[in-house]
Amino acid sequence: MSNTYGTWLKSQREAAGLTQQQLADITLMTRSHISHIEAGRRMPSEEDARRLDMALGTGNVLASFRPRDDDDLADYFGPARHLEQQATMIREFALSFIPGILQTEAYARAVLGMAFPPLSPAECDKAVVARLNRAQILREPTSPVVWALLDEAALRRPIGGAGVMSEQLDHIIGLTESRRIRTHVIPLSLGFHSLLESMLTLMWFEDQPPVAYSEGLRVGRLHDSPSVVEALQSRYALALSDGLPQDESLAVLKATAKGYRGHG
Protein backbone atom coordinates (compact mmCIF):
# COMPACT_ATOMS: atom_id res chain seq x y z
CA MET A 1 0.00 0.00 0.00
CA SER A 2 1.37 3.38 -0.94
CA ASN A 3 2.05 5.40 2.15
CA THR A 4 0.30 8.35 0.45
CA TYR A 5 -2.96 6.68 1.47
CA GLY A 6 -1.93 6.35 5.11
CA THR A 7 -0.53 9.88 5.21
CA TRP A 8 -3.79 11.29 3.86
CA LEU A 9 -5.79 9.30 6.42
CA LYS A 10 -3.62 10.71 9.20
CA SER A 11 -4.10 14.28 7.92
CA GLN A 12 -7.88 13.84 7.83
CA ARG A 13 -7.93 12.35 11.34
CA GLU A 14 -5.88 15.20 12.72
CA ALA A 15 -8.03 17.77 10.90
CA ALA A 16 -11.06 16.21 12.60
CA GLY A 17 -9.33 16.61 15.97
CA LEU A 18 -9.31 12.87 16.68
CA THR A 19 -6.62 10.74 18.26
CA GLN A 20 -5.92 7.29 16.85
CA GLN A 21 -7.75 5.76 19.82
CA GLN A 22 -10.80 7.97 19.33
CA LEU A 23 -10.99 7.10 15.64
CA ALA A 24 -10.54 3.43 16.49
CA ASP A 25 -13.43 3.59 18.97
CA ILE A 26 -15.75 5.22 16.42
CA THR A 27 -14.91 2.75 13.64
CA LEU A 28 -14.85 -0.40 15.83
CA MET A 29 -11.17 -0.94 15.02
CA THR A 30 -8.09 -1.06 17.25
CA ARG A 31 -5.69 1.81 17.74
CA SER A 32 -2.77 -0.32 16.53
CA HIS A 33 -4.67 -1.14 13.33
CA ILE A 34 -5.21 2.58 12.67
CA SER A 35 -1.53 3.18 13.38
CA HIS A 36 -0.43 0.51 10.90
CA ILE A 37 -2.72 1.88 8.18
CA GLU A 38 -1.38 5.39 8.66
CA ALA A 39 2.22 4.12 8.56
CA GLY A 40 1.58 2.24 5.32
CA ARG A 41 2.03 -1.19 6.88
CA ARG A 42 -1.57 -2.35 6.52
CA MET A 43 -4.39 -2.09 4.02
CA PRO A 44 -7.88 -1.44 5.41
CA SER A 45 -10.60 -3.83 4.32
CA GLU A 46 -13.41 -2.34 2.23
CA GLU A 47 -15.66 -2.30 5.30
CA ASP A 48 -12.94 -0.61 7.39
CA ALA A 49 -12.45 2.02 4.69
CA ARG A 50 -16.19 2.76 4.54
CA ARG A 51 -16.33 3.19 8.33
CA LEU A 52 -13.32 5.50 8.21
CA ASP A 53 -15.02 7.61 5.53
CA MET A 54 -18.17 7.85 7.64
CA ALA A 55 -16.23 8.76 10.78
CA LEU A 56 -14.14 11.43 9.06
CA GLY A 57 -16.80 12.78 6.71
CA THR A 58 -14.64 12.09 3.66
CA GLY A 59 -17.43 10.84 1.41
CA ASN A 60 -16.18 7.64 -0.16
CA VAL A 61 -12.58 8.71 -0.77
CA LEU A 62 -10.91 6.14 1.50
CA ALA A 63 -13.12 3.34 0.16
CA SER A 64 -12.67 4.35 -3.48
CA PHE A 65 -8.92 4.81 -3.34
CA ARG A 66 -8.17 1.84 -1.09
CA PRO A 67 -5.32 -0.13 -2.70
CA ARG A 68 -6.77 -3.32 -4.17
CA ASP A 69 -5.52 -6.88 -3.97
CA ASP A 70 -4.92 -6.84 -7.72
CA ASP A 71 -2.65 -3.78 -7.54
CA ASP A 72 1.03 -4.24 -8.34
CA LEU A 73 2.39 -5.19 -4.92
CA ALA A 74 5.66 -6.78 -5.98
CA ASP A 75 7.55 -4.82 -3.32
CA TYR A 76 5.19 -5.68 -0.49
CA PHE A 77 7.40 -7.92 1.58
CA GLY A 78 8.71 -4.98 3.60
CA PRO A 79 5.34 -4.51 5.39
CA ALA A 80 4.89 -8.30 5.51
CA ARG A 81 8.25 -8.67 7.25
CA HIS A 82 7.25 -6.03 9.77
CA LEU A 83 3.98 -7.85 10.47
CA GLU A 84 5.83 -11.14 10.82
CA GLN A 85 7.61 -9.69 13.86
CA GLN A 86 4.26 -8.84 15.51
CA ALA A 87 2.39 -12.05 14.76
CA THR A 88 1.19 -14.37 17.50
CA MET A 89 0.71 -17.23 15.01
CA ILE A 90 2.41 -17.88 11.67
CA ARG A 91 1.57 -20.69 9.28
CA GLU A 92 4.01 -21.15 6.44
CA PHE A 93 3.68 -23.14 3.24
CA ALA A 94 6.83 -23.77 1.21
CA LEU A 95 6.61 -24.99 -2.36
CA SER A 96 10.18 -24.73 -3.67
CA PHE A 97 12.26 -23.16 -0.90
CA ILE A 98 12.47 -23.55 2.86
CA PRO A 99 10.58 -20.59 4.45
CA GLY A 100 12.78 -17.61 5.26
CA ILE A 101 12.37 -17.72 9.04
CA LEU A 102 13.55 -21.35 9.05
CA GLN A 103 16.58 -20.92 6.80
CA THR A 104 20.14 -21.50 7.98
CA GLU A 105 22.83 -19.01 6.99
CA ALA A 106 24.33 -21.37 4.41
CA TYR A 107 20.95 -22.13 2.85
CA ALA A 108 19.97 -18.44 2.78
CA ARG A 109 23.27 -17.56 1.16
CA ALA A 110 22.78 -20.27 -1.48
CA VAL A 111 19.27 -19.02 -2.29
CA LEU A 112 20.24 -15.34 -2.39
CA GLY A 113 23.38 -16.16 -4.35
CA MET A 114 21.16 -17.36 -7.21
CA ALA A 115 19.30 -14.04 -7.48
CA PHE A 116 18.86 -12.50 -10.91
CA PRO A 117 20.17 -9.95 -11.62
CA PRO A 118 23.04 -11.14 -9.41
CA LEU A 119 23.64 -9.41 -6.10
CA SER A 120 27.03 -7.96 -5.30
CA PRO A 121 28.86 -9.65 -2.41
CA ALA A 122 27.95 -6.71 -0.14
CA GLU A 123 24.29 -6.83 -1.20
CA CYS A 124 24.20 -10.58 -0.65
CA ASP A 125 25.72 -10.22 2.83
CA LYS A 126 23.15 -7.56 3.74
CA ALA A 127 20.27 -9.71 2.48
CA VAL A 128 21.53 -12.77 4.39
CA VAL A 129 21.74 -10.76 7.63
CA ALA A 130 18.21 -9.44 7.09
CA ARG A 131 16.89 -12.95 6.54
CA LEU A 132 18.64 -14.32 9.62
CA ASN A 133 17.29 -11.43 11.69
CA ARG A 134 13.79 -12.57 10.79
CA ALA A 135 14.51 -15.90 12.47
CA GLN A 136 15.12 -14.16 15.80
CA ILE A 137 11.40 -14.53 16.54
CA LEU A 138 12.05 -18.25 17.04
CA ARG A 139 14.30 -17.49 20.00
CA GLU A 140 11.17 -16.80 22.02
CA PRO A 141 10.05 -20.06 23.67
CA THR A 142 6.40 -20.03 22.62
CA SER A 143 5.40 -16.97 20.59
CA PRO A 144 4.75 -16.80 17.77
CA VAL A 145 3.24 -20.25 17.29
CA VAL A 146 4.75 -21.47 14.00
CA TRP A 147 3.50 -24.21 11.72
CA ALA A 148 5.53 -25.18 8.66
CA LEU A 149 3.82 -27.06 5.85
CA LEU A 150 6.52 -28.18 3.41
CA ASP A 151 6.04 -29.61 -0.04
CA GLU A 152 8.43 -32.55 -0.28
CA ALA A 153 9.90 -30.92 -3.40
CA ALA A 154 11.42 -28.22 -1.16
CA LEU A 155 13.27 -30.96 0.75
CA ARG A 156 14.45 -32.87 -2.31
CA ARG A 157 15.85 -29.92 -4.27
CA PRO A 158 19.57 -29.80 -3.29
CA ILE A 159 19.99 -26.03 -3.02
CA GLY A 160 23.59 -25.27 -2.10
CA GLY A 161 24.56 -28.93 -2.26
CA ALA A 162 24.26 -31.94 0.02
CA GLY A 163 26.08 -30.40 3.00
CA VAL A 164 23.93 -27.27 3.02
CA MET A 165 20.75 -29.32 2.71
CA SER A 166 21.60 -31.77 5.47
CA GLU A 167 22.37 -28.87 7.83
CA GLN A 168 19.14 -27.12 6.81
CA LEU A 169 16.96 -30.17 7.39
CA ASP A 170 18.69 -30.92 10.70
CA HIS A 171 17.82 -27.37 11.77
CA ILE A 172 14.13 -27.95 11.02
CA ILE A 173 14.25 -31.35 12.74
CA GLY A 174 15.72 -29.73 15.86
CA LEU A 175 13.07 -27.01 15.95
CA THR A 176 10.35 -29.62 15.51
CA GLU A 177 11.66 -32.09 18.08
CA SER A 178 12.05 -29.28 20.62
CA ARG A 179 8.37 -28.47 19.93
CA ARG A 180 9.23 -24.91 18.94
CA ILE A 181 7.46 -25.42 15.62
CA ARG A 182 5.10 -27.97 14.08
CA THR A 183 6.16 -29.42 10.75
CA HIS A 184 4.13 -31.32 8.19
CA VAL A 185 5.27 -32.59 4.81
CA ILE A 186 3.06 -32.93 1.75
CA PRO A 187 4.44 -36.01 -0.04
CA LEU A 188 5.30 -35.86 -3.74
CA SER A 189 3.20 -38.98 -4.22
CA LEU A 190 0.08 -36.91 -3.50
CA GLY A 191 0.28 -35.14 -6.84
CA PHE A 192 -1.92 -32.04 -6.97
CA HIS A 193 -2.84 -30.15 -3.82
CA SER A 194 -4.58 -26.86 -3.06
CA LEU A 195 -1.40 -24.77 -2.58
CA LEU A 196 0.56 -26.00 -5.58
CA GLU A 197 0.43 -22.57 -7.26
CA SER A 198 2.61 -20.54 -4.87
CA MET A 199 4.10 -20.16 -1.42
CA LEU A 200 1.86 -18.79 1.31
CA THR A 201 2.23 -17.25 4.77
CA LEU A 202 -0.72 -16.75 7.10
CA MET A 203 -0.38 -14.47 10.12
CA TRP A 204 -2.60 -13.82 13.14
CA PHE A 205 -2.25 -11.01 15.70
CA GLU A 206 -3.40 -10.22 19.20
CA ASP A 207 -5.31 -7.07 18.33
CA GLN A 208 -5.42 -6.84 14.53
CA PRO A 209 -7.17 -8.73 11.72
CA PRO A 210 -5.24 -11.64 10.20
CA VAL A 211 -3.36 -11.26 6.92
CA ALA A 212 -1.92 -13.52 4.24
CA TYR A 213 1.17 -13.11 2.07
CA SER A 214 1.64 -15.00 -1.18
CA GLU A 215 4.66 -14.95 -3.45
CA GLY A 216 5.55 -16.02 -6.97
CA LEU A 217 8.11 -15.07 -9.62
CA ARG A 218 9.03 -11.42 -8.96
CA VAL A 219 5.67 -10.87 -7.31
CA GLY A 220 4.77 -10.60 -3.63
CA ARG A 221 1.30 -9.75 -2.42
CA LEU A 222 0.00 -8.92 1.03
CA HIS A 223 -3.69 -9.79 1.34
CA ASP A 224 -5.71 -7.83 3.89
CA SER A 225 -9.23 -8.30 2.52
CA PRO A 226 -11.13 -10.54 5.00
CA SER A 227 -12.75 -12.57 2.22
CA VAL A 228 -9.41 -13.20 0.48
CA VAL A 229 -7.64 -14.06 3.74
CA GLU A 230 -10.42 -16.47 4.68
CA ALA A 231 -10.22 -18.17 1.27
CA LEU A 232 -6.45 -18.59 1.60
CA GLN A 233 -6.82 -19.92 5.14
CA SER A 234 -9.24 -22.52 3.77
CA ARG A 235 -6.77 -23.52 1.07
CA TYR A 236 -4.06 -23.92 3.69
CA ALA A 237 -6.35 -26.05 5.85
CA LEU A 238 -7.15 -28.28 2.87
CA ALA A 239 -3.47 -28.72 2.00
CA LEU A 240 -2.63 -29.39 5.65
CA SER A 241 -5.23 -32.16 5.72
CA ASP A 242 -3.36 -33.78 2.81
CA GLY A 243 -0.01 -33.57 4.63
CA LEU A 244 1.64 -36.29 6.67
CA PRO A 245 1.26 -36.37 10.47
CA GLN A 246 4.15 -34.79 12.33
CA ASP A 247 5.83 -38.07 13.30
CA GLU A 248 5.75 -39.30 9.69
CA SER A 249 6.91 -35.88 8.50
CA LEU A 250 9.88 -36.06 10.88
CA ALA A 251 10.72 -39.48 9.50
CA VAL A 252 10.78 -38.05 5.97
CA LEU A 253 12.96 -35.15 7.10
CA LYS A 254 15.42 -37.45 8.86
CA ALA A 255 15.62 -39.90 5.95
CA THR A 256 16.17 -37.06 3.49
CA ALA A 257 18.85 -35.46 5.67
CA LYS A 258 20.56 -38.85 6.02
CA GLY A 259 20.52 -39.23 2.26
CA TYR A 260 22.22 -35.87 1.82
CA ARG A 261 24.88 -36.81 4.38
CA GLY A 262 25.50 -39.99 2.41
CA HIS A 263 26.02 -37.97 -0.75
CA GLY A 264 28.35 -35.65 1.13
Image (spheres, rainbow, N blue to C red):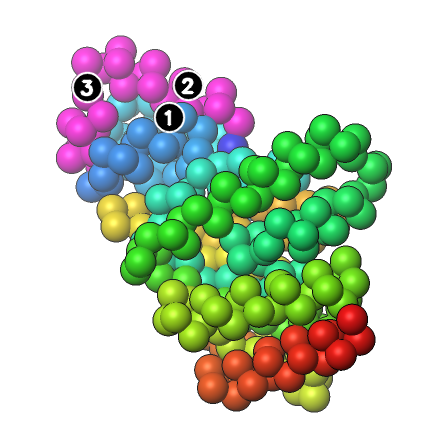
Say what secondary structure mark 2 lies in. helix
Q: Earlier in the sequence, mark 1 or mark 3?
A: 3
Looking at the rendered structure, the secondary structure element under dot 3 is loop
Extreme-right residue of the structure = 117
Number of the front mark, 1 or 3? 1
- At 30% from the left edge and 60% from the top edge, which residue is drawn? 142
In percent of width and height, residue 225 lies at 44, 49
On screen, 98 above or below 187? above
Badge 3 is on which residue?
18
For the residue pair 202 and 224, the one nearer the viewer reads as 202
- Residue 166 in the image: state x and y as whole percent: 67, 69
Q: Amino acid at mark 2?
A: Thr
Separation of marks 1 and 3 at Cα, in angstroms: 14 Å
Q: Earlier in the sequence, mark 3 or mark 2?
A: 2
Answer whether residue 21 is magenta in the image: yes
Q: Are marks 3 and 2 in contact (CB under 8 Å)?
A: no
Residue at the image point whose x is 77% and y is 45% from the top: 113
Residue 14 appears in the rendering = yes
Q: Residues within 10 Å of mark 3 (few under 14, many from 20)?
A: some
Give the amino acid type for the residue marked by disc 3 in the picture. Leu
Residue topped by disc 2: 7
Q: Position of residue 1 (x, y in %)?
A: 51, 33
> CA gap, disc 3 to disc 2?
15 Å
The segment highlighted magenta reads 2-27
* Residue 204 visible: no
Q: For mark 1, does the 10 Å Cα neighbourhood hold few (<14), some (14 to 19), or many (20 or more) residues?
A: many
In the rendered image, which quarter is residue 89 located in?
A: bottom left
To which residue does mark 1 refer? 38
Gap between marks 2 and 1 measured at Cα: 6 Å
Mark 1 lies on a secondary structure that is: helix
Q: Residue at x 26, y 14 (%)?
A: 14
232 left or right of 107 in image = left
